[in-house]
Amino acid sequence: MSEPTIRQERDSDGILMLTIDVPDVSMNVITMQMHDDLAAIAERIRRDDSVKGAVFASGKPSGFVAGADLKGMHFQEGETSGKSRAKQIFDQVIGLNRTFRALETCGKPVAAAVNGLALGGGFEIVLACHYRVVSDNPKLVLGLPEVLVGLLPGGGGTQRLPRVMGVQNALLYLLQGKNLTAQEALGFGVVQEVAPDAEIVDRARAWVKANIGKTVQQPWDQKGFRFPGGVGATNPAFAQTFLGVNAMAHKQSQGNLHQVQAILSAVYEGAQLPMDKAIELESKYFAKVAADPQASAMIRSLFVSKQAAEKGARRPQGQPAAPTRKLGMLGGGLMGSGIAMVSAQAGIEVVLLDRDLAAAEKGKLYTADRLAKRRTDPAKAKAILDRIHPTADYGDLAGCDLIIEAVFENREVKADVTGKAQEVVGADTIFGSNTSTLPITSLAEVWDKPVNFIGIHFFSPVEKMPLVEIIVGKKTGPAAIAKALDFVAQIRKTPIVVNDSRGFYTSRSFGTYVQEGLSLLAEGAGAPLIENVARQMGMPVGPLAVNDEVGLDLSYKVAEQTRKDLGDTSPKQPNELIIEKMMELGRHGRKNGKGFYVYPEDRSPKYLWPELGQYFPTATNPPSPAEVKERLLFRQLVETARCFAEGVVETPQDGDLGAIFGWGFAPYTGGPFSAMDTMGLDTVVQTLDRLAKRYGERFAPPQLLRDMAARGETFYGNAARKAA
Amino acid sequence: MAEAFIYDAVRTPRGKGRKDGSLHEIPPIELATQVLKAVRDRNRIDTADVDDVIMGCVSPVGEQGADIARVAALNADYALTTAGVQVNRFCASGLEAVNMAAAKVVAGEAEFAIGGGVESMSRVPMGSDGGAWALDPAVAFKTYFVPQGVGADLIATKYGFSRDDVDAYSVESQRRAARAWQEKRFARSIIPVTDVIGEVVLDHDEHMRPGTDMQALAALQPAFAAIGEQMPGFDAIALLRYPEIERIHHVHHAGNSSGIVDGAAAVLVGNREIGQKYGLKPRARIKGMASIGSEPAIMLTGPGQVTRKLLKRLGMGVNDIDIYELNEAFAAVVLRMMQELDIDHDRMNVNGGAIAMGHPLGATGAMILGTVLDELERTGKGTALVTLCVGAGMGTATVIERI
């Protein structure tokens, strides 16, 4: 028998003081052990006549309960039970729910004293108590964030919250995963008291004491309960709420997030049922969603893999901690300024170097502007700005323990600044290049010790984009990788580690999405269809709009440079011809207000250039939306698979994180590697073969994918075997 | 098999469907009762020969609930043996009721059957009956539910009708309706509605705005732009189904959409023998009828489809129909059907329609069937096709032939 997660102590009034204190963790989470402990406690309160009531509190200063342990949420397929996966999950969650029901129907007063955050299942324990007192601690939040990781609240949250605050209010929190502050919770009647931290337990106990001997029931278990705001399909308020909320949720999710519809259904149907039936229904919807591969994929990528990457999953073994104390930032342009900003915010001293002092000062202004816009506390802002030292003198780089260059994407310019920096700091210092296109191995040749040269690829705008792509050149050593990863951890971003290749992983794979969009345009799909389908499949921006953002002139230059570098003299592809035509028409993208879209000067929303159809007419038989979606998706999938086959990407986790956080690849899929695993590699290969036959070799699957499909393997299955 | 003949058609005038509308004081049961009495009394029939009363009603709850057709028959002192059933095919309910009455006659189930409909939109507002379609989240997602006004704007966008096109159509609808009333073209069908002391409360369609011109309409704001583009944002859902469209142009407003009104109608259908028994001359023969399902998000493209289906079954061409009557739910619905089937405006809705006179949901189908029958008789023409666009993506149509 393992250590209990909840301590029990009966006081002189017969009140059972229940202190939640899960062993060996700093924050309480709901474990299987806690399921058992709660069940035993509910039973004791009901049966033990010496127990007159109970108070739940936390034994940890970090908060109440942070919810279920997502890492433990691996619902395994039953091998011998013959039960479906959904049924197994149902059996598991209905158990906890029966405990919650037993608690709230025991007839004796049960209160919660909440000292800090109570999220997910933690909040659901609180809602199952008759009386709820929370601390005025400003860090206290109550919330049901399950929707954000592909799940729905499965501990009664979709039923109790609407019964407390009304369907419309509750849906706002359930669908957005938004937290309630103590005062908001008080206003909605979600809690009965807000009190100073030191008093919450006493107040909860006082309420229980005052109610000893009375039959205490939740409002929804009382006769004549009136659902706040009304309920039922012919209730005008209820009907109006769902008419609107269904549409909003459909629009926001584009119908891609299964848990969103399940939450809506659980509330819509459950609100019309008595509580026991309603809870059972919620458990069914929870099981349905949790058994859906979409939820597992989302939890894995958005939560488990992300945290693991941030905690150093890819950090080489045996490397000592290598935090950056003083950063030498070469280049005060958009990227350099952004890197300087996030570094200074992380407490790192930054020497921001540019051609002349004015340019460097301008780079520092970037941080000042953004801090001002965010209304950062002036003292705090000053401290951050004081860490940024603009200069044009390479001598000022002395003492820097990491150099990052973000100068113009030109070999000669990069070689020049790299060499000058080396003269001051020496080749033992780790040097990172923020190039997005030039191979790291060749750039490293300038550094006397290429073992200390690495790619650190940021995304724009740096202060907002969460990903950093670490690129390992042929000669890059483990110390450089450790240094780069420690730096990324300092600035609190999510790293992936990939090997060198033109465009590395993210730019290369993302580029295919844009190119396929252009090919579709050339074939007469029509711009609206391409752009709408792209967004509807979960991409943040359509391929034509992205091209406008990047700049059509830049796309043109990169394409020309690549041809030159590779000595490619093959006839230009339709997508290249489109860019050429747009250049000819003087349409350079957003920067000159005209690209595929028109950008009105009054800043009203952009719209597709009405004359686009004259130059790229829509075919009489344009491809169907399903075909457009398939091509935009599989063109990306095959490129990521190639990156894996070529060893550019070493783990599916890196591949999925890079795709979701680097270029916004449909997050609900868990990323391209999760998407391929979910579909089955067999299906992926068949689809790619069909597409390759019809549209060309760019869809041809790599041999590795064929082999894996033939062996019935998956990316994550292989990764798990390799790790074991 | 027997043939189904139309012996008579009556309707109430349409009252504004608001608290200040003339028919607001009249309960829907009374509207239905008065048309049932009229169709009995005008034809001097013994209602023991009426086997069934079928009435369309789109919000069959509250005052319109509990099978209003049977209760109206009882209230109108029909024989106790006359059954009654309420049907709901949304906007085509009234025509569907007539089609079902005809089917019962054809099948030999009924000798006389009455098809009609009733809707007091001022007393039982649209949507009062809830329903899974828009409200149940799983169903709303699955069917890409968007309100029909957004569907109508989508039709205008997809098939290229500008704000001027829909407004011009509506100006003409008002002009035709005004002319029809001036020339008393509806006189044979209209049953003035009376109140508790027997006084007439309404004897004309009061929703009309004769003299409406382009300037007047241009001043009206699009009715569905806010719910489409902002909250809750139905346009995005329509685009999930129609991604080839960049954005929806919202062109419909109160002046080019059907009016919200109160009213009722009844059509007496029977076989040849029962007419002979009472010495009644059939006014028309019901030549054929059909319903069809169409894509529900755009919702309102059923009329063209059901017309093709019905004409094909009858071995007729588009030009074999002398007059078309398509309910003017929204101007773009009519423009689309004329475009799709190449029907000249001269043969379509010749006496105006719901944009001018209003659309009492459950009754309209039976009303416009009567309207077109009057017009055939007035002009001496032979055949007419009546059709309506229908919620959730459907179309219903009937072809009648004057005898």
Image: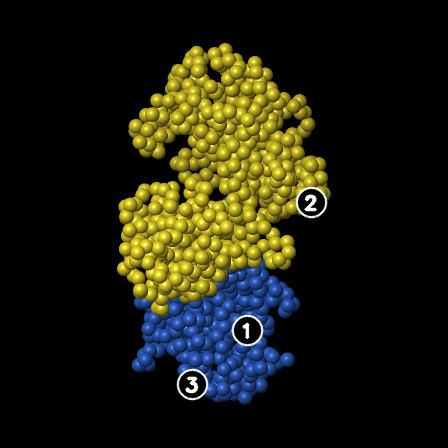
Image quarter hosting the C terminus of chain A = top right
Label 2 to label 1, Cα distance in Å? 58 Å
**Labels 3 & 1 near each other (Cβ < 8 A):** no
What type is the residue that disc 2 sits on?
Answer: Gly
Q: Are marks 2 and 1 on the same chain?
A: no
Q: Colour of chain A?
A: yellow
Q: Can see residue B132?
A: yes
- Alpha carbon distance from label 3 to label 1: 24 Å
Could you tell me how far apart the alpha carbons at marks 3 and 2 are, in whole angstroms?
Answer: 76 Å
Q: Is residue A372 left or right of residue A324?
A: left
- The one nearer the camera, B28 or A419, is A419
Circle on res. A712: 2
Q: Quick one: SS at disc 3?
A: loop
Q: Are marks 3 and 2 in contact (CB under 8 Å)?
A: no
Q: Are marks 3 and 2 on the same chain?
A: no
Q: Secondary structure at mark 1?
A: helix
- Mark 3 or 1 closer to N-term? 3
Q: Provide the chain ID for the residue under circle 3.
A: B
Tell me, by letter, which chain the rendering colours blue: B
Q: Nearer the viewer, mark 2 or mark 1?
A: 2
The spot of residue A540 in percent (x, y) is 50, 40
Residue type at mark 3 is Asp
Label 2 chain ID: A
Residue topped by disc 1 = B99
